[in-house]
Amino acid sequence: MSQPQAMVEFRDATKVFRTKSGEVRAVDGVDLRIEAGEVYGVIGYSGAGKSTLVRLINALEPVTSGTVLVDGQDIHALKEAELRKARSGIGMIFQQFNLLSSRTVSGNIAYPLEVAGWPKPRRAARVAELLEFVGLSDKARQYPSQLSGGQKQRVGIARALATNPKILLADESTSALDPETTQDVLNLLKRVNVELGVTVVVITHEMDVVKYVCDRVAVMEGGKVVEHGDVYDVFARPAHPATRRFVGTALRDRPSPAALERLRRRHPGRIVTIGIREDGASSNDLTRALREHPVDGTIVYGGITEISERPYGSLTLEVVGDDAAIDAFVADLSRSTTVLDLGTAASPNEDPDAVGPRASTITPSGPPGRDDLATHLDAAPSHDPQAQLRRKGPQS
Ligand SMILES: Nc1ncnc2c1ncn2[C@@H]1O[C@H](COP(=O)(O)OP(=O)(O)OP(=O)(O)O)[C@@H](O)[C@H]1O
């Protein structure tokens, strides 16, 4: 059976910039499908090629080779008039909002309608509708300079939606905003997707944004898509080192090198981090393993979060017992989840994907992961029954 038509499909798409210092392959042989009605994230470090990839969708950059299909049309093969029409079906918002400072909020939102030749009364009705949707009806006559960053981005979103696009491209749309405002704007993007049925493509360098708003994600590095899939799966089984680093920044469920040093100072036993996920080990498996193996386990650090409304994270335990028993406990749990044996102070193993400085401070986790149920139990007193999962087994 043939696949349904994607909203956006890249087929071996390549974009090469020719500069004085040589060629830059900003997008390098990308094959990717973005389905109608999803929120799709494109994440990568600076220079990975995210913006260029997304600018191929509305043909702001011509493709060097390969094909980009938008709603079934080869967007780079269109004549000027057809391209104008196709572009009116693709809205875009930007990190710096790109509002016209000489126009009021209403004037900014009306601008694409004027360009598209809408008659004045229809324009006014549409602007009023959009202002209400983004919650800015009371700001209609104000100028961008009188607005906060979050309000400016709301105007940007209203303007991008003016001509009823099928796709909204959001290029680092929350990178200039504080965490609180970021969450408001991401909630608005969710509403755009759910209530208006618009396919949203979110470019970001923050995995928190992906975690909060996206259904699927592509990770870019050096112009290539190095990994893509459902957000939960990518979080649960990150394969590429770049993905593992991004995932680490969003979960903060594993101790940073600094926190690990502190844990080792406080807890002489073996430090073991265990992944907790819906389709693998749960806390029940952990309880079972502790019951079945002659070891004691105390939770010393952890963070369980929700990704796509499903629980995910990890718990770090101090495991005390005979070396062979601890090895068997680790091997047992390794069959159903990721287990990281971080060793002891005397014989330490490093976390290969550790995020954060080695100094003696932990950077507190920041929103928009405020929905996290993060429970950093490192500081919990060892007599706290909530922080302990103990099992007294037969000591050998
Ligand atoms: N117009 C251009 N001319 C020459 N090189 C360019 C041009 N636009 C982008 N590049 C180069 O292409 C590569 C990818 O850039 P791009 O802006 O797509 O990356 P990005 O992942 O969006 O990065 P950032 O998050 O910093 O915007 C970079 O090496 C960049 O310098």
Image (cartoon, helix red, strand yellow):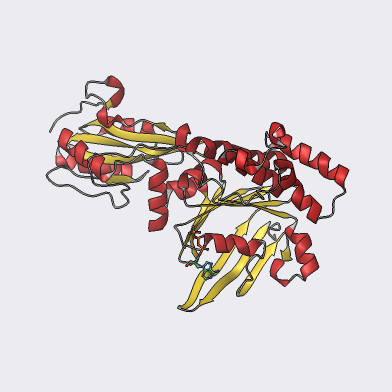
* Residue 272 can be seen, yes or no: yes
Return the x and y of residue 168 as percentages of the image width and height: 66, 51
Quarter placement of the N terminus: bottom right
The quadrant in which residue 191 appears is: top right
Quarter placement of the C terminus: top left
Quick check: 266 above or below 348?
above
Indicate left or right for 187 with 274 as reference. Answer: right
Indicate left or right for 210 with 395 as reference. Answer: right
Q: Residue at x 86, y 46 (%)?
A: 120
Q: Residue at x 64, y 43 (%)?
A: 144
The quadrant in which residue 376 appears is: top left
Quick check: 39 above or below 132?
below
Return the x and y of residue 97 as percentages of the image width and height: 60, 49
Quick check: 211 above or below 66?
above
* Residue 321 can be seen, yes or no: no
Return the x and y of residue 104 as percentages of the image width and height: 71, 43
Indicate left or right for 136 with 395 as reference. Answer: right
The quadrant in which residue 285 appears is: top left
Q: Residue at x 53, y 60 (%)?
A: 50
Return the x and y of residue 20 as percentages of the image width and height: 48, 79
Depth order, front residue of 232/168? 168
